[in-house]
Image (cartoon, grey):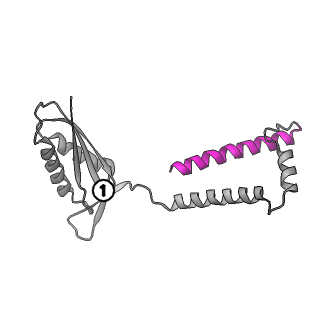
Amino acid sequence: MVPAVVTAVLMLAVGGLVAAEVISALLGRPLRVVPYDRMLAWASSTPWRSPQALGAATLLTALGLLLILLALIPGRPGTVPVRTGDPDLIVGVRRRGFTGALAHAADRVPGVERSRVRLAGRTARVTARTTLRDASGLPEAVRQAVRARIEELSPVHDHPVTVRLRGR
């Protein structure tokens, strides 16, 4: 998404600049922000086999191939596939809803003041905040509660759980 936004902003800027140059030239008062007279002179006097022309073509080709490659790489899915009672039916739960359910399970563990869950790939990373001085055994209790909630939700893929405990 970031490369697409950057490309769109650059294309918008170039398009706006070209439009401003064309409109101002049609009105008889060219802006000449871009020194296109020099660019035209360079382009008309430079052979295609020159190192500058080949370098520019290579750079633009590499940039285009990079953008195509970035477009082919799949992004982060918006949903987590979970099983239902019907073996032929799988539904998608939004990532935010899935992590919210896991955080709620972690919050219900005695000693946990507040928790947050993030999905990193397929790993559920739990950050739990506690006010207990002796929190031994608490990370494992949180892990078990979150694992139990994951099993209740029955996602298609396994989600290992890591717990990080933070004290006040």
Toward the top, the furthest residue is 168
In the figure, is residue 46 to the left or right of 103? right
In the figure, is residue 98 to the left or right of 135? right
SS category of the residue bearing label 1: loop
* Residue 110, position as x, y percentages in the image: 10, 38
Residue sitting at x 20%, y 54%: 150
State whether residue 54 is above or below residue 113: below
Secondary structure mostly seen in magenta is: helix
* Residue 81, position as x, y percentages in the image: 30, 60
The magenta stretch spans residue 83: no
* Residue 3, position as x, y percentages in the image: 54, 50
Name the residue beneath numbered marker 1. 122
In the figure, is residue 167 to the left or right of 13? left
In the figure, is residue 135 to the left or right of 16? left
Residue sitting at x 66%, y 60%: 61
Amino acid type at mark 1: Arg
Q: Quadrant of the C terminus?
A: top left
Disc 1 packing (10 Å; few <14; some 14–19; many ≥20): few
Q: In this rendered view, identify the residue nearer to me: 21 or 71.
A: 71
The magenta stretch spans residue 11: yes
- The quadrant holding residue 12 is top right
Highlighted range, magenta: 1-28
* Residue 35, position as x, y percentages in the image: 82, 42
Instruction: Give the mark count.
Output: 1
